[in-house]
Image (spheres, grey):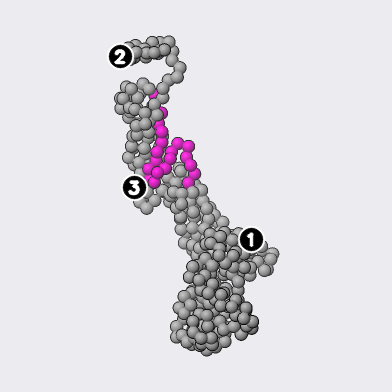
Amino acid sequence: MEYRDYYDILNVGRGASEKEIKQSFRRLARRWHPDVNPDDPQAEEKFKEINEAYEVLSDPEKRSKYDRLGHSWKQWQRSGGDPGKYDWSQWFTGGPRGARVHWNGDLGDLFGGAGGEAFSDFFGAIFGGGTAGRRRSAADIFGQPVRGRAYGAGSRGRDAETNVTVTLEEAYRGTSRVLERGGRRIRVTIPPGVRTGSRVRVAGEGNSGHTGGDSGDLYLSIAVEPHPVFEREGDDLRCDVAVDLCTAVLGGRLRLPTLNGDVSLRIPAGTQGGQTFRLRGKGMPNPRRPDERGHLLATTEIEIPQKLTPRERELFEELAKSRGKERHA
C-alpha cells in the first residue's frame, strides 16, 4: 500500500485552514469534474482523488489521524526505512512495531470511518472504507491476520449546494426554480418566508452514491435581493411614507403599498415626522409557520411645500400670526 499525500493532492500546505481547504477543493473539483471533461479518461480518477483528499482534510477527526500517520511515515523515510516494509498498523495501535491487530467487529468501527466511496486502499485501511465493487479483507491491506468481516459496502453520495437569488416578492409568496441535475431538469419549490441565508433541502438530488449507496441531498442557499421600498427586519418590514403637510396637521388617509396590495393608512391630526405606524400581519410570513406574518412598520416623512402661491403664503402668515409666531425675514 502506498502513502497518499492529501495536502499535495489539494495543493494546500499542512497548516491550511478549513476555509483554504474548501476553496482549493472547489476550484479543483470544478476543473476536474467528469462532466466538464467528457473526453478525458483521467478526469474521473483525478476527481475521485480530489474527493478522497477532501473527505479526510475537511473532517477534523480524520485529518488528525492522517497527520499522525504522516508524521510517522516521514520519520520512517528519514531513518532510511524501506517504504515497502513500513508497518501501517503500528502508528494506529500505539503498540510496539510489529504488533498484531485483533478485532472481531467491522473495520469501520475500528477506525471510526464509514464504508468506501470508491476511494483508494490507503483510505480504506486508515478510515475503514473500501474499493468500489470489491470487498477486501484487512489481511489484503496489512499483510497480517486480522479477524473480522471485509469492508466495501456502498456509501451515500455527497450533498450538493447551489446559490439561488430571489426577489422580496418571491420570498413573500414562495416561488420555484428549474435546475439542471445530472442531465435532468427538476423544479424545486422555495417556500414562503425564506430569507438571506436560508437553506432549502431537496432530498436525493445531491451527488450520486457509490456501489449502490443513496444519493446525497441538494441544498439551495438563498439570497434575497434588496427592495427599493421595503427593508426587512426578521419577519417585519419597514418603509417610509410621505405625508403632506395638510394631512399631517389636519389628519386624513393615505394609500400605502404592501407586498399584498395597497392598504388605506389613517393619519391622525397632528402627526409628527418620524412617527411609526404598525400594520399588523402585513409583514413577511414566518418560514416555520407560514400562516403567521410579521408586521409592516411605516415611518412618516412630512413633506414641507417648497413653492407657495401668493395666496398660500398669505394664509400661512395669517396662521403664524394667529398662533402668536412673529416672522423674521
CA gap, disc 2 and disc 3: 51 Å
Residue at 63% from the left image edge and 70% from the top image edge: 45
Residue at 59% from the left image edge and 65% from the top image edge: 13
Give whichever of 20, 44 is nearer the camera.
Answer: 20
Residue at 57% from the left image edge and 79% from the top image edge: 134
Look at the picture and state if 197 lies above or below 236.
below
Q: Main secondary structure of the magenta part?
A: strand
Residue at 34% from the left image edge and 13% from the top image edge: 326
Q: Amino acid at mark 2?
A: Gly
Look at the picture and state if 159 lies above or below 101.
above
- Decide if residue 51 is in sight here: no
What is the magenta range? 224-244
Say the numbered circle drawn on residue 31: 1
Residue under numbered circle 3: 292
Residue at the extreme bottom of the image, as rendered: 145
Q: Amino acid at mark 3?
A: Glu
- Horizontal and vertical percent for residue 257? 41, 34
Give whichever of 258, 229 is nearer the camera.
Answer: 229
